Image (cartoon, helix red, strand yellow):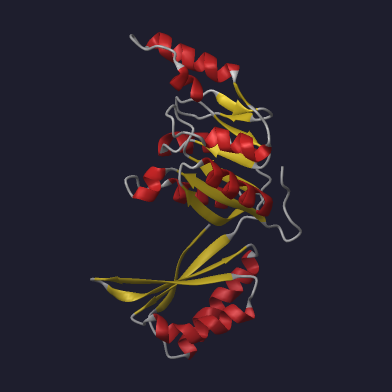
Amino acid sequence: MAAASMDGRVTAAVLIIGDEILSGRTQDTNLRDIAKFLGVHGVDLCEARTVADVHEEIVAALNALRTRYDYVITTGGIGPTHDDITADAVAAAFGVELYHHPEIVAQLEERVRSRPGAVMNEALLRMARVPVGGVLVRSSVTAPPGFNIGNVFTLAGVPTVMRGMLDDVGHRLKGGAVVVSRTVRVEGSGESLIAAPLEAVAKAHPAMSLGSYPFFGEGGYGSNLVLRSRDPQELAATVGELIEALKAAGIEGVREVEPTT
């Protein structure tokens, strides 16, 4: 498994697999949930890709991501239908064979026994396929497991099942220092006015992330300026520095809102 780098940074990517996402028929929510989950564990989500149910494209994307980042989480494509080819692609990327994992087979057999009229068939058995060397990632909800091989975690695409699988991922991550964020809210001023002081503070703190997120509504307009850092002391000092810089530029309606992690 990957270990935290010298600066305490551990990185990850998400690979979302499925024609239904690219067609717009299904709205992805897994990326949001995974990003929040990784942040709690001190892992920076640095990239997200969405690919179609095409074997070669999945393999190429997976190999590119797993060599660049400490971890890769894939979602989708481990169900029972012909287009569920994620297990095949992961096995190909690692150069190993697939086999029917006995624990998953037993779980599927129990499911069949509990459902009148259900039969074990090749479609069901597709969900039991795991790359040689893979370790199961079990879900806290009733569903066949995903798996982990190398630095890749292959999870379900169904959001409730995917979130249940994350429960079995966290303890396997070698996380870094957790990033803390604080927000300065500017009301009644557009981004063009706050750009200069924000840029000056950002340049003075290159290791820190500063972003502007404008808002508009019946209650007015403005921007939430979000500062993120692994150093709580520098973060607190920079918040004060930013507020002073904004006020010095003649910008009013500036206040810090409740800090978040």
Residue located 50% across and 80% down the image: 243
Q: In the figure, residue 10 lies in which quadrant?
A: bottom right
- Work out whether residue 110 or residue 15 is closer to the camera in this orientation and state it: 15
Q: Residue furthest right?
A: 6
- Work out whether residue 129 or residue 221 is closer to the camera in this orientation and state it: 129
Query: How many discs mark residues in the rendered view?
Result: 0
Residue 136 at x, y percent in the picture? 60, 28
Res. 52 in view: yes
Res. 167 in view: no
Residue 226 at x, y percent in the picture? 49, 69
Where does the N terminus fall, quadrant-wise? top right
- Side (left or right) of 219 relative to 193: left
Residue located 65% across and 53% down the image: 69
Q: Is residue 90 above or below residue 249?
A: above
Residue 56 at x, y percent in the picture? 55, 44
- Side (left or right) of 210 relative to 25: right
Residue 40 at x, y percent in the picture? 56, 50
- Work out whether residue 222 or residue 142 is closer to the camera in this orientation and state it: 142
Q: Is residue 31 above or below residue 234?
A: above
Q: In the figure, residue 159 lies in which quadrant?
A: top left
Q: Is residue 119 above or below residue 141?
A: above
Residue located 39% across and 84% down the image: 252
Residue located 76% across and 59% down the image: 6
